[in-house]
Amino acid sequence: MRRIILAAFAVLLLHAAPSMAAECRNLALVANGGVASASSEYSGWPATALNNGTRETSIDRHWSDGTRFIWPDWAAIEWSSPTRLDQIVVRGLVFTPNKTVAERTLDRTRVQYWDDATSTWVDIVGRSGQDNPILAWTGPTHAEDGAEIKQFDFASITTTRIRVQIEEGPTVLTGGYSSLDEIEAYDRGGCDPPASQCSNRGLDGIASASSTHSSGLYPVTGVNNGQVESGATKGYWNDDTNGVWPDWVQVAWAQPLTINRVVARIPLAQAGFPTGEITLRRTRIQYWDATTSTWVDVVGRSGQSNPILDWTGPIGRADGTETRMFHIAPVTTTKIRAVIEDGSTDGWSWLDELEAYAADCATPSNENLALGTNAGTAIASSEYSSLASIAKLNDGRRQTHLGRTYWMDGTGFSWPDWAGIKWSSPRSLNRIVLRGPALYSSYPTDRRTLGRTRVQYWSDDSSTWVDVVGRSGQDNPILNWVMPPDMTDGSEIRQFDFPTVATRRIRALIEEGGTHGWSFMEEIEAYWMS
């Protein structure tokens, strides 16, 4: 994650930050000295794909082993000299219709580093909830780009090698291969915000609830373990009084804490998990006022409604989670809670995470700054109708089939078209994500194609649009963009990570569209990533 402060804008930044430390680089990349290897490789799916910085979007550009139904397999990154690390990220494959859950499941995957002193491989010991070995990797979408990830944060080590050992892979007849998209390694010392300033303080609290599911699979500790869960995995909190409300879940601290942001997350939706079962209705977010000994509703800014009446959208976080975020005037409290006054259609109340952030946090928050609730305003060259309006570019809603949640231009067979986001004052950004609608399989390829799309930000210095320069594999302009017929999270994406810039506007300039004559976009997202 790279940071460069542009001095010309420093005094204008809405999210002003202290001077940035050195950039956080993925040390596994070839450009940073990493060399990828593997126990074997399948023709066309080489080990070099493990550290090329290119994240797959369908079924290409990843590593697969060459010994089908034979395990263990391994994939590794090596450096020519000892390298200090404190984070490893393993990226699995993006879920596509061409790869079922069973085909992409990796069982018992072990993340290790080489200890030169003992000449042995040693298991990484991550923080709570970062289990190693990974016992079942079934592939819910956790990452912002649609990939399934496993992240490990640990005390600094110095090593020349890291590896992922896959002790058992997909055993279904159509599977049999071990596959990984990317292995990433970081030394975050000096490049992350101080933990005391911008960390999720919910992790430091003690969770409790009105009740907890008797199975033991949905513990109350799931609301503050820092793990993003899906509807098909366990680890989030679930109540034990089916069909009876209200329910509540809270996080408390031993000492008063001053906070100005609260985030509630529900489990990620996925195929086979209907919206009605994901939905929580009428959820109230509160903090404890010790002076009056009462619970008080948090008051967010415009668009951050409390109580929450409907959880069906938008998706406001870079990791794809369904969230509700509340920016509040600083309050000092010892506990926060979510009161579920009416639950989902299956009779249960649940919550994945309840997060709180300290009032002195003035560093990147990883939230989607393009959303209307974050003061972003959608703009475009034209719009087709209210069914495909400009406002849909930043409403946070991702379609799953034919639902019109995307923008389409109103000038058929006439290009260029453009769609963008603007703010009233400069925003610091280092990531832009374009989401194309996952048009249903009945749509032929030509109706799902955008050609030559350019991603840009506005420079106040030069009064010109400037192409963003992403990392290796993030080509700009995008020369050919064919939307797959379906994606689990509802969209095909193009992501661009770049040095931090301050700007008032971003846009996607569509210089040529599909043969059907229209330009379209489901969502434009903008982030200042830590």
Image (cartoon, rainbow, N blue to C red):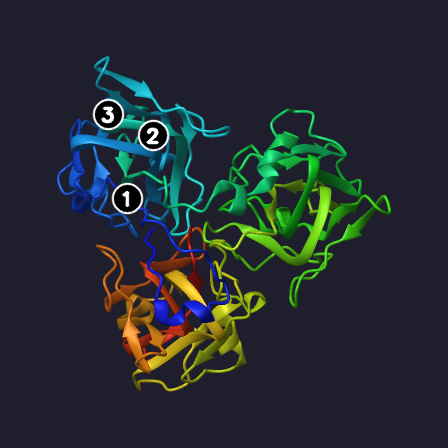
In the picture, measured across the screen, residue 483 lies left or right of residue 367, that is left
Mark 3: few/some/many CA within 10 Å (<14, 14-19, 20+): many
Question: Measured from the top left, where is residue 112 in percent x and y?
Answer: 30, 24
Please give the residue where the numbered disc 1 appears in the rendered image.
Answer: 26
Q: Secondary structure at mark 3?
A: strand
- Give the mark toward the camera: 1 or 3: 1
Type of amino acid under label 2:
Val
Label 2 SS: loop
Instruction: Report the residue at 52% width, 47% height from top.
Output: 198
- Whichever of callouts 1 and 3 sits on the residue coming sooner in the sequence is 1
Question: In terms of sequence position, does the residue under pointer 3 or pointer 2 come before the other?
Answer: 3
Find the distance from the CA under tag 2 to the CA under tag 1: 34 Å
In the rendered image, which residue does mark 3 sit on? 73
Q: Position of residue 137 (x, y in %)?
A: 41, 32
Few, some or many residues within 10 Å of mark 1 (<14, 14–19, 20+): many
Q: Mark 2 highlights which residue?
A: 172
Q: CA distance from mark 3 to mark 2?
A: 17 Å
In the image shown, does 428 or 67 lie closer to the viewer?
Answer: 428
Q: Position of residue 447 (x, y in %)?
A: 33, 71
Residue at x 14% of width, y 43% of height = 44
Q: What is the distance, in whole Å, between disc 1 and disc 3 at their CAs?
A: 23 Å
